[in-house]
Image (cartoon, helix red, strand yellow):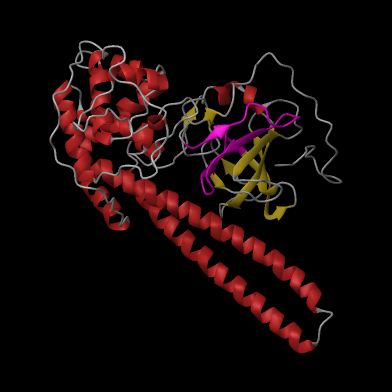
Amino acid sequence: MRSLRLALVLLLVAAAVVGTARADLFAVLPGADAPNPPGRTSLSAALLQRPAVPAVRTPDQLQRLWRAAADTYGVPWSVLAAVNSIESNFGRNMGPSSAGAVGWMQFMPGTWAMWGVDADGDGSANPWNPEDAVYAAARYLAAAGATRDVARAVFAYNHAGWYVDQVLKLAQAYAAGGSELVFGIDRLASALEAARAELAAASIALDQTRGVRSVEARGAKARAAPAVRAARLASASRVAALQARVAAAQATLDRLRAAAADVSFSPAIDAALGGPVLGGGHAFPVGGGPSSVSVAAGHHDYPAADIAAPAGAPVFALGAGVVERAWRSPDPACGVGLLLRTTDGRGWVYCHLALLETAVAAGLRVAAGTPLGLVGATGDATGPHLHLQLERADSWPQREPWLVAFAGVAFRWRAAAPAASTAPVASTAPAHGAGDSIDVILVR
């Protein structure tokens, strides 16, 4: 059954990674019993910056690389593949990270100086080079005791229990399914990301065109009848073309989601495909992971959180509850959004979405992690993000224990983590409208 599922993925996802062939010849490599001598391997200012043309490797090349490095240092290849996936999406997202980590396996400069390897023998130990980085990661894990206790070694790589759990679960799935599963899942994840982005872009363009059309229609009243008819036909044609684009993008995303549901036989794979990160009865409200999602500790002068993520990133219900209100036509301030009333009675406002899922409407009951829409920049927003706040803005979302627990797992802080002891700022926002229970400021 699993092979059939993977076959479906590979049929649906026609994607290929193009790379430059590299000979599988390597220099004499240092052991894992001791780090590099001081000054032997360090990162110059140039090597701290992402190269203008990052190195790319084909799936076959990566598979050989993981297995060769694993054999050299006695580390499971699946663990190297999992670390490579989580740290850089196989070289597609190599930083530098907010913490300063760089390259294919996200090494900090100090750690690279101790354990970096010139694996391809070109005279430079370079973390942006896949051979150097993967061999260095295998060496570091071996030095941390991977041959005896893989979990402990992975913890040394990143001192977080959630990270160890994520790596080991993904490695277990990779080991069971082989490299075919690794790259099938990766291609599906890339296709899902592209499909979400296309749907978000098409939906925003349609909303903008409809807005322009209404303005043109009002202006046309002052013109002669033939001009009015021509303007209406041109506007209708633009709207129809964008409606067709939205429908096609939605159909593509629906097919890919069906494929994802078929192969999501473990939480690790579900997360790799952009699914929600769950914990303690809550879900982090935006998908994408800490490599692309961040939360500002402050930013607003009233309690609210801006969750920056790529346009099209999935948006989820943060907890079980009921959608109390939903607006598909962009509000001038909030854009496309909704009010989610969770089972504890609290109301959560979501703003700036590109679009809402088809099923999202007032009265819809949801569980934690239910898809609600896609990240956008509608309304008063300067870039793609989810604006999240409590209904009356009387408490900082950044200080909610459930959200703090996801730090590092589903997002990174854009600046220092918020101080829990700081008193919330009282909202002085006017009511949003007569009879409207949302008492908030809705801004970018």
Q: Nearer the viewer, residue 157 or 355?
A: 157
Left or right position of 193 against 376? left
Left or right position of 42 against 238? left
Most common secondary structure along the magenta stretch:
loop
Q: Does the stretch in magenta take in 415?
A: no
- Which contiguous range is marked in magenta? 292-321
Q: Nearer the viewer, residue 318 or 61?
A: 61
What residue is at 56 percent from the left and 23 percent from the top? 404
Rendered view: 421 above or below 308: above
Left or right position of 382 against 15? right
Quadrant showing the C terminus: top right
Question: Which x, y percent locates residue 40?
Answer: 28, 17
Observer able to see residue 92: yes
Question: Which x, y percent locates residue 317?
Answer: 57, 38
Picture quadrant of residue 138: top left
Question: Which x, y percent locates residue 81?
Answer: 27, 33
Q: Nearer the viewer, residue 212 or 26?
A: 26
